[in-house]
Protein backbone atom coordinates (compact mmCIF):
# COMPACT_ATOMS: atom_id res chain seq x y z
CA UNK A 1 0.00 0.00 0.00
CA UNK A 2 1.32 3.44 -0.85
CA UNK A 3 2.28 5.98 1.79
CA UNK A 4 -0.54 8.45 1.18
CA UNK A 5 -3.18 9.87 3.50
CA UNK A 6 -6.71 9.04 2.35
CA UNK A 7 -8.13 12.28 3.79
CA UNK A 8 -5.54 14.99 3.10
CA UNK A 9 -3.62 13.38 0.22
CA UNK A 10 -0.26 13.95 1.89
CA UNK A 11 2.62 11.98 0.34
CA UNK A 12 6.25 11.44 1.28
CA UNK A 13 8.62 14.30 0.53
CA UNK A 14 12.17 13.94 -0.76
CA UNK A 15 15.07 15.83 0.76
CA UNK A 16 18.69 15.55 1.77
CA UNK A 17 20.58 14.07 4.69
CA UNK A 18 23.32 16.57 5.42
CA UNK A 19 26.39 15.24 7.20
CA UNK A 20 28.77 17.24 9.37
CA UNK A 21 31.02 17.73 6.34
CA UNK A 22 27.97 19.04 4.39
CA UNK A 23 27.88 15.99 2.09
CA UNK A 24 24.30 15.50 0.89
CA UNK A 25 22.54 12.18 0.26
CA UNK A 26 18.90 11.69 -0.70
CA UNK A 27 16.32 10.63 1.87
CA UNK A 28 12.53 10.59 2.23
CA UNK A 29 10.42 12.35 4.82
CA UNK A 30 7.55 9.91 5.33
CA UNK A 31 4.04 10.92 6.32
CA UNK A 32 2.88 10.17 9.87
CA UNK A 33 0.40 7.45 8.79
CA UNK A 34 -1.59 4.96 10.80
CA UNK A 35 -4.64 2.76 10.32
CA UNK A 36 -7.79 3.82 12.14
CA UNK A 37 -11.33 2.46 12.16
CA UNK A 38 -14.21 4.92 12.21
CA UNK A 39 -17.92 4.34 12.60
CA UNK A 40 -19.66 6.20 9.78
CA UNK A 41 -23.05 7.09 11.29
CA UNK A 42 -24.67 8.23 8.04
CA UNK A 43 -24.01 4.85 6.36
CA UNK A 44 -24.28 2.82 9.62
CA UNK A 45 -21.01 0.98 9.00
CA UNK A 46 -17.37 0.80 10.08
CA UNK A 47 -14.67 2.02 7.69
CA UNK A 48 -10.93 1.46 7.89
CA UNK A 49 -8.82 4.44 6.81
CA UNK A 50 -5.09 4.97 6.42
CA UNK A 51 -4.75 8.54 7.63
CA UNK A 52 -2.11 10.97 8.83
CA UNK A 53 -2.19 12.92 12.07
CA UNK A 54 -3.29 15.98 10.07
CA UNK A 55 -6.12 13.91 8.57
CA UNK A 56 -7.27 12.90 12.04
CA UNK A 57 -7.35 16.56 13.08
CA UNK A 58 -9.38 17.35 9.96
CA UNK A 59 -11.91 14.65 10.84
CA UNK A 60 -12.15 15.96 14.40
CA UNK A 61 -12.68 19.51 13.12
CA UNK A 62 -15.22 19.10 10.30
CA UNK A 63 -16.60 15.60 10.94
CA UNK A 64 -16.16 12.25 9.22
CA UNK A 65 -18.88 12.64 6.60
CA UNK A 66 -17.68 16.07 5.45
CA UNK A 67 -14.04 14.93 5.41
CA UNK A 68 -14.90 11.88 3.28
CA UNK A 69 -16.91 13.99 0.83
CA UNK A 70 -14.05 16.49 0.57
CA UNK A 71 -11.49 13.70 0.02
CA UNK A 72 -13.68 12.06 -2.63
CA UNK A 73 -14.01 15.37 -4.53
CA UNK A 74 -10.24 15.80 -4.57
CA UNK A 75 -9.70 12.15 -5.59
CA UNK A 76 -7.87 10.93 -2.48
CA UNK A 77 -10.27 8.03 -1.83
Image (cartoon, rainbow, N blue to C red):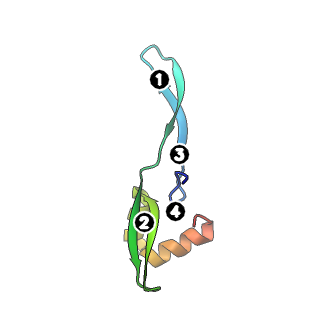
**Do the residues bearing badges 2 and 1 touch, measured as CB atoms within 8 Å?**
no
Quick check: 44 left or right of 12? Answer: left
Q: Which mark is residue 18?
A: 1
Tell me how far mark 2 sits from mark 1, CA to CA. Answer: 33 Å
Q: Which mark is residue 6?
A: 4
Q: Secondary structure at mark 2?
A: helix
Instruction: Name the spot of residue 21 as percent of width and height, x first.
Output: 45, 13
Q: Is residue 44 above or below residue 14?
A: below
Q: Residue at x 50, y 64 (%)?
A: 7
Q: Earlier in the sequence, mark 2 or mark 3?
A: 3
Quarter of the picture containing the N terminus is: bottom right
Tell me how far mark 2 sits from mark 3, CA to CA. Answer: 19 Å
Of marks 2 and 4, the one in the foreground = 4
**Do the residues bearing badges 2 and 4 touch, measured as CB atoms within 8 Å?**
no
Of marks 1 and 3, the one in the foreground = 3
Q: Secondary structure at mark 4?
A: loop
Label 2: how many Cα within 10 Å (few below 14, some 14–19, many 20+): some
Q: Earlier in the sequence, mark 2 or mark 1?
A: 1
**Do the residues bearing badges 2 and 3 touch, measured as CB atoms within 8 Å?**
no
Label 4: how many Cα within 10 Å (few below 14, some 14–19, many 20+): many
Quick check: 57 left or right of 23? Answer: left
Instruction: Name the spot of residue 76 as percent of width and height, x first.
Output: 58, 64
Residue underneath mark 2 = 58
Choose top left, top right, bottom left or bottom right for residue 62.
bottom left
Tell me how far mark 4 sits from mark 3, CA to CA. Answer: 13 Å
Residue underneath mark 3 = 12
Q: Earlier in the sequence, mark 4 or mark 1?
A: 4
Q: Secondary structure at mark 3?
A: loop
Choose top left, top right, bottom left or bottom right for residue 60.
bottom left
Of marks 4 and 1, the one in the foreground = 4
Q: Secondary structure at mark 1?
A: strand
Amino acid sequence: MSKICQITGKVAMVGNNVSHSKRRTKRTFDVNLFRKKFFWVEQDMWIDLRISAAGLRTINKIGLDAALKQAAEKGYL
